Amino acid sequence: MTGVLPIHPGTKAPGSARALAAALLVLASLAARAAGAAPGVLILHSNQRPTPAQVVIEDTLRTVVPQGFKAPVQIFSEYLDDEWASLETYGAAEAEFLAEKYRRRDIRVIVADALPALQFTAKFRDRMFPGLPVVHIAVARDRLEGLALPRNVVGNTENQDPTPTLQLALRLHPGATRLVVIRGASERDRLWDARVRAAIEHLGNGLEVEYLNGLPTAEVLRRVGALSPGALVFTPGYFSDGAGEVSTPRQSVERIARASTVPVYGTFDTLLGTGIVGGYMTRYEDQAKEAGAIVVRLLNGAAATEIAPESVVRVPMFDWHQLRRWGIDERLLPADAIVTFREPTLWDRYWPEISAGVAILLFQAGLIAVLLVERRSRRRMATALEESEKRMSLAARAARLSMWIWDVARDKIWATTYPRQRADMPNELPATFEDVLEMAHPADREDLDQAVRKALATGEELDIEYRVELSGGDLRWIAARGRTEPGNGQRMLGVAVDITERKLAELRAAEDRAALRHMSRVSMLGQLSASIAHQLNQPLAAILGNAEAARKMLARERVDLAELREICDDIVADDNRAAEVIRRLGALYRRGDMKMEPLDLNELIRETLDLLRAELLIRHVAPRTDLALALPMIDGGRVQLQQVLLNLVLNAADAVSGIVIEKRSLAIRTEAAGAAVRLFVVDNGSGIVEGDLGHVFDAFWSTKDGGMGIGLAICKSIVAAHYGNITVANNAEGGATFCISLPAGLHA
């Protein structure tokens, strides 16, 4: 392939020559790509090699880019030697040299390290690699803002404002009265003047400031070596001193810090370890990682215009040795401060050996202590165990409690003597499970056997109550609790308690509640005596009238048999009506257990309202009904649920008694709600005081004069026995609503 035309330094190539060179470069790049060569990245460093910053940046890029690109990539680097070789003078020749050098390489991205490299690339990129994307790194934000850049240039910037570092230094040294600022003589060094002066003006605390700018290094070292306490030194380092000596910022800062009699602060993380205390720094490794991520995106085909520029965050960083040298308390450092070069403590260095030694000593001491107290502990343990067994036996006897252990594999049950005495079990030990089943009541044996087998099979807790028959014919109730031993399904542990007294008390309580409900019904029917008399008087009067009419007809010579037959039919019908009233009353008066049967709640409501018709007429209350069609059946006790309805309707009639007759309202409504049936009794009376709503269903609580306060309590117990619930709430427009919710029956 034909090479580019040579261009001598200081001369300008003709336009046709530059165009031909660019075309040849493009053709060479295309040829490299066609040949399958790995894409290339060219890093242009501003300075001469080696500087610590350049080493960190290049090493990081050479790691990050191949990892992110996940394919082979060639990374090249060049040094522009900006410290002593003016790019204004040699830039064109350098560009031609690089274009020719990398003509056969597939360069895809240029990385410009620091401001001079970016300026060089911005000016000569199209002469070297036309239109190639450029990623800049380690460029100060304030220098980038005034720089005219071509297209396809992107990257990150660093904040080199020294204000945070100076503020932090003054906070760590509250007695400081003087600040010495040192910079070099090169053009890049002079960029710090504006930054430092703006920072000092921002401090505004009357601090005495001395500038050592562009002096020979020997003079700088003499000056800082003569500083008295109360002074601080700030320097970013320099590339060239006043005598023309070229160095790196790290080398210059190292000499300054070694000679200084006061603390020195800087701005670059590569200066840590030279003797400076620290400062706010933008780490070069972080900058290189972000720049590497941008390079990877460009290699993958992203356009530079699609990538937003980044600004790497600064962090406070310090040298642990210098903190100790100048007596700075680490507690004064910012919470996010990074302290480098911290020397490990004795524990950090030798913690395995120290830990092992301490462990051996502790083990020996513990072993000796165990040996010394073992005999004494055994004696105490034996005494305590004997006393514990006595107390446990005493407590078990007092609580009528028995503890038992069942070896399932051998079918042997060991138990304390109490249940044996109560259940007339033989005193010989141990018993078998068949012995236990034999002593159980015949009606409970199957349930006991199934419960025990299930607990053995599933590991769940055994919890059952059963009866045992004594030799005299008496029955005792036993509650057994137990479960298999963890990790051993063939061994069950548990307790047994004689609960006969509790069961008898429960039966007596149930009988008392039934008697109370019966007394409540009888009392309620006493209140309805006028209504009941009215309902009986109607059919009886009709029977009497029809009988007298029949007698008169029989006195006639010619008897109309058809009419007489109708009179007899009326007498039979009226007699059946009276008998039905008496039957219903008899059911309400009758005392006995609740009989569960399928019920139509709507039919029960109509029957109850028919019974109450005369009573409600006397009270001038006209009930309204809104009964849901096709309401599911419920399982319940007819008499008990009718008692609830009677109580709620009469209470609602009492609630509206103080209202003008024309405005009295009593409504009964039913509805189906999923798997439940609901009944509402609504009145427009005075309602219930808000503070009393929680006590409405309490026993012996009433707001009526002379009321016993058991009606609603009985209603609640009846509804609960039907596995339902009853609630009450005040209506917004006045009055109250009682709601009963009952589960739909199996016959629904």
Image (spheres, helix red, strand yellow):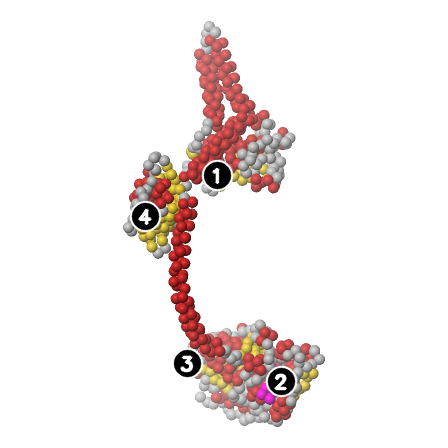
Return the residue at label 1: 720
Return the residue at label 3: 36
SS type, badge 1: helix
Q: Give the range drawn in magenta.
A: 256-269
- Residue 417, placed above or below residue 32: above
Q: Earlier in the sequence, mark 1 or mark 2?
A: 2
Query: What whole-number distance in Å separates the C-alpha atoms at marks 3 and 2?
Result: 59 Å
Return the residue at label 2: 262
Query: What whole-number distance in Å separates the C-alpha atoms at marks 4 and 2?
Result: 89 Å
Query: What whole-number distance in Å separates the C-alpha atoms at marks 3 and 4?
Result: 86 Å
Q: Do the residues labelled 3 and 4 touch (CB within 8 Å)?
A: no
Q: In the displayed structure, does residue 486 sit left or right of residue 63?
A: left
Q: Are marks 1 and 2 in contact (CB under 8 Å)?
A: no
Q: Which residue is drawn at 40% across and 45% down?
A: 397
Q: Earlier in the sequence, mark 3 or mark 4?
A: 3
Image quarter of residue 12: bottom right
